[in-house]
Amino acid sequence: MKLLYDEELNILCEADYLSVDKHGQIRHDAFCCSKCLKRFFDDDKDLHRSVKNHYSKCNFKLQDGVNVFMKEHMLDEKIRLIIDLLGFVSKKEQKIDFQVTYHKYIKENNMTVFVYVSDGKPLGLLTTEVKMLTFPNGDKKECLIISDFVVLRYAQRHGLGKILFEYMLMYYNKKPDELVYNKPSHKSQQFLKKLYGLENMLVW
Ligand SMILES: [Zn+2]
């Protein structure tokens, strides 16, 4: 199995297709800088050394805490890269075919992305969008949807998901049962049940 690592060899996710050589053969594990999430997956012989070199000089640093990104931030190439890579990790971790958090969709669908950062390292994201939904009884209602939610594998079990989720609730002044959940993963369902006793969530 090919994996995506950071410069300290923390595993971010499975990453098979990321490390393909000139001939289209999978040859290397892939690496990324834990601050700017720049990926290293070309035909370089020593990717780990390259990423460590890059990291020692990397001067990109997001602010610690929860950062909120919207479509206007997608003009910034570095922010785009971070959002797209976290979206990729989420897709891989949830084993879904479709990447939900992606800069193009953020612009098109007016999504909001909450990114948790510690020591300059983005460690998790929660993506929301507001949509007019039609319910089975014919009612139409504007709903706040939780579209994507992930904490990096090595940063899990430290309460970061809770920080992200509660920040988002405060930001919108909502309660967990007022939201709609887009294909929630088993992990997300367990999380909502454990923290908020939410069993019958509105799923979209
Ligand atoms: Zn970097």
Image (cartoon, rainbow, N blue to C red):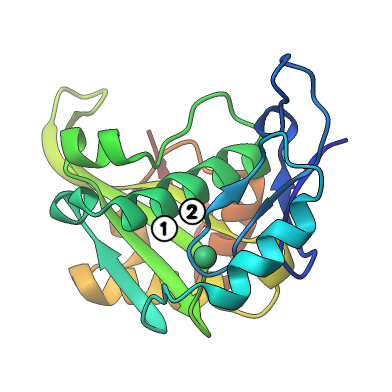
Q: Could you classify mark 2 by the number of other residues whose Cα lies within 10 Å: few (under 14), some (14-19), or many (20 or more)?
A: many
- From what the image shows, is residue 136 above or below residue 34? above
Q: Which mark is residue 149?
A: 2
Spatial CA distance of label 2 from label 1 is 4 Å
Above or below: residue 63 compared with residue 52: below
Callout 1 crowding tier (Cα within 10 Å): few <14, some 14–19, many ≥20? many
Q: Amino acid at mark 1?
A: Leu
Q: Residue at x 70, y 67 (%)?
A: 52
Front residue of 1/66: it is 1
Q: Secondary structure at mark 2?
A: strand
Is the residue indicated by label 1 positioned so its CB lies within 8 Å of ligand 1? no
Asked if 4 appears above or below 196 in the picture, the reply is above
User: Which quarter of the figure is the C terminus placed in?
Assistant: top left
Mark 2 and mark 1 residues within 8 Å of each other at the beta carbon: yes
Q: Residue at x 66, y 33 (%)?
A: 18
- Helix, strand or loop at disc 1? strand
Expressed as whole percent of the image width and height from the top left, the position of residue 77 reads 30, 51
| Relative depth, front residue between 146 and 136 | 146
* Residue toward you, 199 or 76: 76
Pick whichever, 113 or 179, lies toward us. Answer: 113
Q: Residue at x 77, y 65 (%)?
A: 10
Which residue matches tag 1? Answer: 126
Q: Answer with the quarter of the image where residue 194 lies.
A: bottom right
